[in-house]
Image (tube, rainbow, N blue to C red):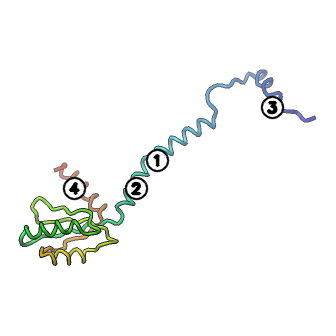
Amino acid sequence: MAYDFDKYREKRERVLGVKKRGLGFGLVATAVSLVILLGLGMVVIPRSIAFLQNRQLEDAIYKLSGEHTDAQQALAELKKQDGVREVVVDSHGSRVVVTFNKEVLDTAKISAFLLKQGAQAVLLNEVGHSQRLHTMKKEAVATGGL
């Protein structure tokens, strides 16, 4: 007959003085790994979602010339176009940043639309939306938040 470890476990533990204290290694390892995974998830998941939402966005920077009343009407119409997320005019009213979905629109279509509406606009630059936001953050830090 083979020796049965489970049958004599309690007697062995009593003789050897083994006392069960605290939490088991498996429970501690599981708790630590869950904390690490949840912490990483809280950091990584929101950034991933933000990236996926903004990856198709581009910013086109235009300089307006001529009558600003015609341009304001054209910009109001441009905001209603499919694919245009945002139209921002600077404080002087001479530069316009159009944030658009590059799968739906491109700068040629936007320029043609502005020309058709009678607004004289010249394309200065086209950059990725996240790149422009990053540049604006850097400029705000460099100028002290002005």
| Vertical comparison of 144 with 98: above or below | above
Disc 3 marks which amino acid?
Asp
> Along the polypeptide, which appears first: circle 1 or circle 3?
3
The label number, if any, that marks residue 95 in the structure image:
none
Disc 2 marks which amino acid?
Ile
Residue under pointer 1: 40
Give SS at disc 3: loop
Query: Residue 11, how many percent across, how many down?
Result: 80, 23
Name which quarter of the figure residue 8 lies in. top right
Crowd tier of the residue under label 2, counting other residues whose Cα lies within 10 Å: few below 14, some 14–19, many 20 or above: few
Query: Residue 62, how many percent across, how many down?
Result: 17, 70
Looking at the rendered image, the disc whose residue lies closer to the viewer, 3 or 2, is 2
The label number, if any, that marks residue 6 in the structure image:
3
Residue at point 9%, 61% (across, down): 92
Disc 4 marks which amino acid?
Glu
Looking at the rendered image, the disc whose residue lies closer to the viewer, 2 or 1, is 2
Crowd tier of the residue under label 1, counting other residues whose Cα lies within 10 Å: few below 14, some 14–19, many 20 or above: few
Disc 1 marks which amino acid?
Leu
Looking at the rendered image, the disc whose residue lies closer to the viewer, 4 or 1, is 1
Asked if the residues shown at circle 2 and circle 1 are in contact, with their CB atoms under 8 angstroms apart, the answer is no
